[in-house]
Image: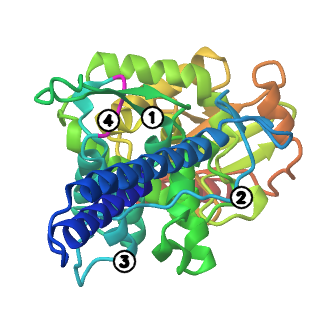
Amino acid sequence: MRFALTMSFLVVIYWAWGIANDYLFGDIGLNFDLFIQGIIKVGFASAIGFVFVSACVFFVTTRRKQKSAFESVIIDEYGTEFNWPIMLSKFLPEVIAAPLHINMHPLEQELLGFLNGYREWPQDINDPSAGNLADAAINRWRAVHKLHNVTELHRIVALALDLGKVLSYAEKRSYAPWHKPWRRDKVSYVNKAAVHGGFSAFVLSTFDTFRRLDENTRQTLLLAVRFGRDPLRIPSNSPAIVQEIYSAVHRAEAASHTKKDATISPESLATFEQHLSTYAQGMLGQIPLTNTDVKDAAGVYVGGREAILVVSLPHFLQTFAGCLTPDMREKLDLWELKTTVQPTWELVTNKFRGLNALLEEWDGDTAENGLFSLSFAGKIWPHCMVIAATPEKMPMLYKQLNKLPAAPHQPEPAEDDASLLADIKAKALSIDGLLG
């Protein structure tokens, strides 16, 4: 359309110059017959040229919609069906007035310039109060700026997290009547495809500054953006920084629109309990154990007929929080590891107690509120659950644990220094009594 308008404008200019040069300012002056003939000839040629260019534009734009023998139907994990012809064209991001800031990564500059073109694009097509795509991304980016220990990778993901919505949503325009030029067109937006991170990662990959990054950085950014709204799908072999980026970006986003309350509402606890019923057993299998020689182990598989599993409750909650929404994690204060007693601890112990899987006696020691203070992996773990993952109660976890070697030494009850000293003295006196 731009090409057609440009050609039409040039033809009109050429026609006006011909009229002025040949009929108005020539040696013979104004010749009315030649003037009329010139208007007819040039006007007819202009009309033919305009029709030809318009036909070419129409043919090119409609050609893409015609099916050929090269289409393939692809259905992604969200159920969206794609039936696109094979084309060499590629999405090219349009950068508008990118800010030039010396302390800003070049990719941040391009992303901000790209978002400038989507000041009217909705952030959520079903929630008009969510604002537009550009403001939501920039507010998230500013919130990430306020966090400590963040890098340019965190800020880039904050801007790119929802870029896929430029492809998932489509603009639907109702043009005003031509005879009422004072009226504005009515613009609405419709769903063209399911919103998911694959589109966002694709759009991010088209920026020139992104392609100039090293391979590891590109992979980290694509993983963080691709699974930024679906953390349970983050591949287990992803770099640790991917999880760090997810936590930082969503923590900043949740804090920006969630009112922090000192007390946790009953509704939040009820929602947390529902998630426990769904994910608690599965999350036990994701705790790093000493049996697998991993770093930062938070549990140990003891073995036995009941498949005894010892897990640190604070570390279990840190792992379990990954299946919660960012707003829920903010309300329950589950972004960081908490080693002090939390309101959610009782819900966790009650859940496993209700499954008859929580052991409350271990090696002659009795649990306090369902928790033990144990020593394993060369450390003292003050808040541990002892879980009996029998095949009747937890078949999937039992099968997973049976593939691991049992621990060579079982965890031992740990006590504070005063208790240990008193125990040593008592045993020494008993020995003295036996010897006497």
Q: Which residue is mark 4?
A: 122
Place of residue 81 in the rendered image (x, y in percent of width and height, measured from the top left): 69, 30
**Would residue 363 be found to the left or right of residue 340 on screen?**
right
Q: Residue at x 23, y 78 (%)?
A: 100
SS at circle 2: helix
Which residue is situated farthest in the left direction here?
Answer: 182
Q: Which residue is mark 1?
A: 169
Label located before the other in sequence (3 or 1): 3
Relative height, residue 92 to residue 167 (above, below): below
Cα distance between the residues tagged 3 and 4: 26 Å
Tag 4 or tag 2, which sits nearer the N-term? Answer: 4
Please say if the residues under marks 3 and 1 sit with CB atoms less than 8 Å apart.
no
Q: Are marks 3 and 4 in contact (CB under 8 Å)?
A: no
- Disc 4 is placed on an element classified as loop
Which stretch did the figure color magenta? Answer: 121-126
The mark nearer the N terminus, 4 or 1, is: 4
Name the N-terminal-most of marks 2 and 1: 1
Asked whether 43 or 381 is in front, the reply is: 43
Do the residues under discs 4 and 1 have CB atoms within 8 angstroms?
yes
Tell us which disc is closer to us: 2 or 3: 3
Could you say which disc has been placed on residue 290 in the image? 2
Q: CA distance from mark 2 to mark 1?
A: 47 Å
Comparing labels 3 and 1, the label whose residue is closer to the camera: 1
